[in-house]
Amino acid sequence: MTNLAQPGQSPKNPSYSWYRWVLAVVLSVAQPSTDVTRKGFCLFDIFSLLSWGGRGEGKVLVRAMVKVCGWQILLLAVALTLNGCLGSMTPSERLFRLSDPVSPKKYAQPLFNGVLAVETFQARGMLARERTILYRDLALPNETQFHPNDLWEEPPAAMLQSVLSHCLVDAGLFEGVIQSGRYLRPRYSLNGTVDRVEQRASNERFDTLIRIDLAITDGDADKIVLSGSYQAIEPANDGQMETLLPAFDRVMTRICGALTTDLEQRTKAETSKMTSPKVSHAAHPNGARGDVP
């Protein structure tokens, strides 16, 4: 059957309303899961509107809008609509965090009589507040890059503070381990400064690096129990986060093990000093000054 139009009117397109309803149902019910699929539907919808705008009824509406708003406003509205549909074709952001390490050695009884408070870690540069995962090409050692769509769940300084706290809890070196800010005066305090948390690449070889400065103080004795810089490097098969993340976890396990070992050796050294016999200066055969361990 031929669709005849009245004088001064253009023929109606009977299929236009049909596929508009199909698109509405698909977009509201099916909820396309991929960003590309949603953009495809959106562009198809805009193309349909533009096609309709070239016909009789559409031309009348466009001319009325131009008369009211002007060409500049109309073009701006079309540009904003296209920008909203096209947007960025990059994948959505992914968030990562390190696993809580298991201490390589566990102690049945605490070696330190007191509670340890893990203070808020400091960090160099953007490691304190940014969540970007840093990347360094060793051919350009002074240039720092970052993964465009991959982020840490929280800034590296806060993340490493949490990881080391769990490590010390798991080791059982102290009577208790708490985060800073609790209503308790601890005897020991752990302060840290994060210096490097990054992926590195050189000649198709990949690895992960973490370097952190740590210091534990005894508030009752007003002395430093331990102070040092801890660094570990672990290889990775490629530069993808799926393989880099286990390498970062291995790095923190090694640092955790080194820290607990140093603390154990420090307690042994202190115990040795306390149990060693005291020899006076006058009685020492070589005339050495001070106590002999």
Image (cartoon, helix red, strand yellow):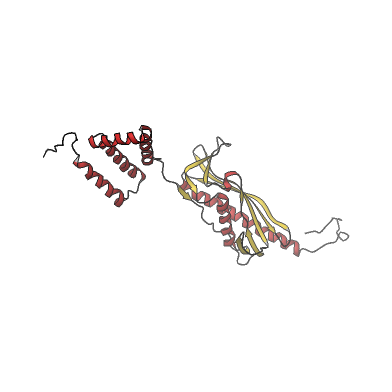
Q: Is residue 69 left or right of residue 259?
A: left
Q: Is residue 273 above or below residue 36?
A: below
Q: How many marks?
A: 0
19 and 70: which one is in front? Answer: 70
Q: Position of residue 77 (x, y in %)?
A: 37, 38
Which residue is pictured at 56% across the width and 56% down the height?
162
| Quarter that holds the C terminus | bottom right
Which residue is pictured at 50% across the width and 45% down the height?
236
Which residue is pictured at 52% across the width and 45% down the height?
132
Q: Position of residue 134 (x, y in %)?
A: 53, 43
Q: Is residue 156 above or below residue 13?
A: below
Which residue is pictured at 38% across the width and 41% down the height?
84
Residue 139: quadrant of the picture: top right
Q: Is residue 206 above or below residue 178?
A: above
Q: Residue furthest left?
A: 1
Q: Residue furthest top?
A: 71
Q: Is residue 262 left or right of residue 274?
A: left
132 and 212: which one is in front? Answer: 132
Q: Is residue 179 above or below residue 201?
A: below
Q: Is residue 72 left or right of residue 284?
A: left
Q: Residue furthest right?
A: 282
Residue 21 seen by the camera: yes
